[in-house]
Amino acid sequence: MAVDIVIPAFGESVTSGVVQRWVKKDGEYVTKDEVIMELETDKVTGEIRAEASGTLQTLAKEGDTVQVGQTVGRIQEGAAPAAAAPAKAAANAEPKPAPQPAHAATVAEHTESDVRATPLARKLAAEHGVDLAKIPVPVGQRIREQDVLNYVNAGRNGPAAPAPAPSPAPAPKVQAAPAASGQRGVTRERMTPLRQRIATRLVEAQHTAAMLTTFNECDMTAVMELRRQYKDDFEKKHGIGLGFMSFFVKAAVNALRAFPMVNAYIVEEGGQPAIEKHDYCDIAVAVSTPKGLVVPVLRNAETLSFAGIEQGIKDLAVRARDGKLSLEDMQGGTFTITNGGIFGSLMSTPILNPPQSAILGMHAIKNRPVEHPAGSGQVAVRPMMYLALSYDHRIIDGAEAVQFLVRIKQGIEDPQRLMLDL
């Protein structure tokens, strides 16, 4: 009896995906619940598992775009091939290899049949011409993109392979180098579903919202001093570092409560526009991954402590970079924070994350001369950060947006306000 392999539904908004790779090849025997295929959608990369044990027949090729509900293969139910038993017996009859050193049990080279790697690791390996089976990793561990990069870098920095004897006439070889450097290659590759989704949503935001950006700056001295003073104690107690993002999430929650329209959506109800307000703060945090920008959501941020915020953000960031985010992790969100400062951005105008009405942009901290103390007429060099708030002018008035950003500035410059919920 044949069992069809059907693309399952990953969520209401996911209707198609790309066959990233067949983990098991056509004609191979598979067991029930074994991962047989990886599917990349515009939001997540999912694993398709076998619903029965038997011989695999693939109907879709790697790189094909398939729809939810489409049959992409079949499993012909049955026992494992009989040839496997004699082969196993013959293998058992062979002399056992000599015992290896203790450390050899923790790292091993893979064969093509048992290699396990993330989709991004496979993509990088293909780009660099690396055989995944030759990358040593701890036994049972999945090869990740960093393992591939380390392997490539080790090859570049390691001893060079023996070169053939030089030609008696070196002049032609010296002249060949400029010719190679003058080549003008052009390559094209299909946009991934995730990148297509990002492009669509960014264009949608600019076409549907009356987007405007207001700027301010904040003095980071108080937060930096607080971190310096309690950083070690915080990490010892909570097991997580104290970063800047928890302060900005707290400041954003404080401001969202004071200006609830910034935490609202414009939606349609009965064919007419309506305003959907939220009494919770689900803060989306932009995370850059090798595949593109994703925005996982920190749920109920208003109920979280500083340690809870830091742990939640770290967990989301790690899973985002490992391609482990679920569709639920990226749905919803009432407000977004993006930090271009980690890449050196001094100022930018972030684009809204629909259907949200506002997004806060953080930037690099730079020492600048400013008036300090305020109103004193004296100039001092202080660590300053530019803040940008992009907002939908259809639902948020300019005065409200400016006051919202000032509220965040006050919370960062005087963190005690955040502790006392002022």
Image (cartoon, rainbow, N blue to C red):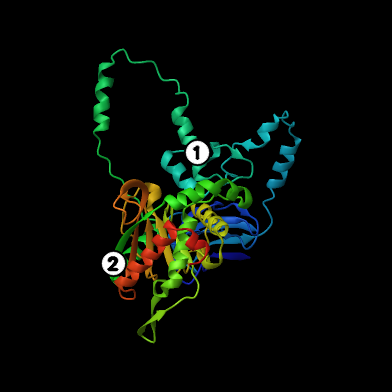
- Which percent across, then down, holds residue 386? 34, 54
Q: Please tell me which residue is depicted at 42% across the width and 63% down the height of the picture.
A: 336
Spatial separation of the CA atoms under disc 2 and disc 1: 49 Å
Near mark 1 (Cα within 10 A), the count class, few <14, some 14-19 or many ≥20, is: some
Local SS, label 2: strand
Left or right of 94 in this view: 270 = left
Number of the label disc, if any, that sits on residue 317: none
Q: In which quarter of the image is residue 252?
A: bottom left
Amino acid type at mark 1: Asp
Earlier along the polypeptide chain: callout 2 or callout 1? 1
Task: Identify the residue position indicated by label 2 in the image.
Answer: 212
The residue carrying pointer 2 sits among few (fewer than 14), some (14 to 19) or many (20 or more) residues within 10 Å by Cα, namely some
Q: Picture quarter containing residue 163? A: top left
Left or right: where 371 falls relative to 410: left
Percent x, y for residue 86? 72, 43
Q: Which residue in the protein does label 1 denote?
A: 131
Q: Which residue is drawn at 30% across and 71% down?
A: 398
> Quick one: 250 or 85, which is closer to the camera?
250
Q: Is residue 242 visible?
A: yes
- Quadrant where the image shows the N terminus: bottom right
Callout 1 secondary element: loop
